[in-house]
Amino acid sequence: MNARHIEGRARLLPDAVNTDYIISSRRKRQIPEMSRLAGYIFEDLPQPLDEPVSPGDILVAGEDFACGSAMEAAVDVLIASGVRAVIARSAARTFHRNAINGGLPLLIAHRDVADEGDILQICYAADGEIYNATRHERVRTVPVPDLAVRLAAAGGLIKYCRREGMPPPGLLP
């Protein structure tokens, strides 16, 4: 079985963080480079974060994470900003699919798995688990499809296809 081990600092987000809160459409039009765009994530949250998201952070969100538009840029900019994984009580279906395709680990679990700043260790696998090293607590997550784990390990769908010698999606006859 494949597994990916991820460690990072928990950053708490509220319920219903839509894709425009992740990155505003206004910024996407102004700045096409993901590496530069990453500096503006969550800038329009109604209740701003105390400090910016840093590389290595793990986002811990409530219900309906990434609702709204189906833009792939929401996943791409989180990856570009160095976010290691997302834990959410629930996530929009399109975001979930984009996260899998982009190689961003997304786990479904209650937001109470962590407080702001807790150190989390994730076993991103079919029988995934979150270990809160700050609290010394283990929590099981909703099962993760093995293909999602393999795609995350490869860095996303396109990289996985290249590694496996498969034509990338959209290039099939």
Image (spheres, rainbow, N blue to C red):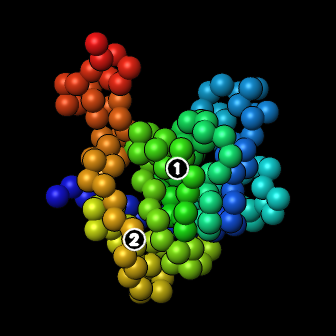
Q: For the residues carrying marks 2 and 1, which lies nearer the camera in this image? A: 1
Q: Looking at this view, name the residue that lies furthest to the bottom.
A: 136
Give me the residue at 57% from left, 74% from top.
Answer: 111
Residue located farthest toward the right when viewing the structure as drawn: 46
Is 135 placed left or right of 14 in the picture? left
Of callouts 2 and 1, which one flags the residue occurring earlier in the amino acid sequence? 1
Taking the spot 69% from the left edge, 66% from the top edge, the residue there is 14
Give residue 101's position: percent from left, percent from top. 41, 39
Q: For residue 123, say whether it is visible.
A: no
Q: Amino acid at mark 1?
A: Arg
Q: How many C-alpha atoms fall within 10 Å of the one at disc 1: few (<14), some, or many (≥20)? A: some
Helix, strand or loop at mark 1: helix
**Alpha carbon separation for disc pair 2 and 1:** 17 Å
- Rendered-image quadrant of the C terminus: top left
For image coordinates 25% across by 58% down, the residue present is 3
Question: Label 1 near label 2: C-beta < 8 Å?
Answer: no
Mark 1 lies on residue: 93
Residue topped by disc 2: 141
Pointer 2 local density, CA inside 10 Å: few below 14, some 14–19, many at least 20? many
Q: Quadrant of the N terminus?
A: bottom left
Quadrant in which residue 76 is drawn: top right
Instruction: Please state the horizontal and vertical placement of residue 145, each as a whole percent of the image.
Output: 30, 55
Please report the residue visible at 28 percent of the width from the left and 62 percent of the height from the top.
Answer: 126
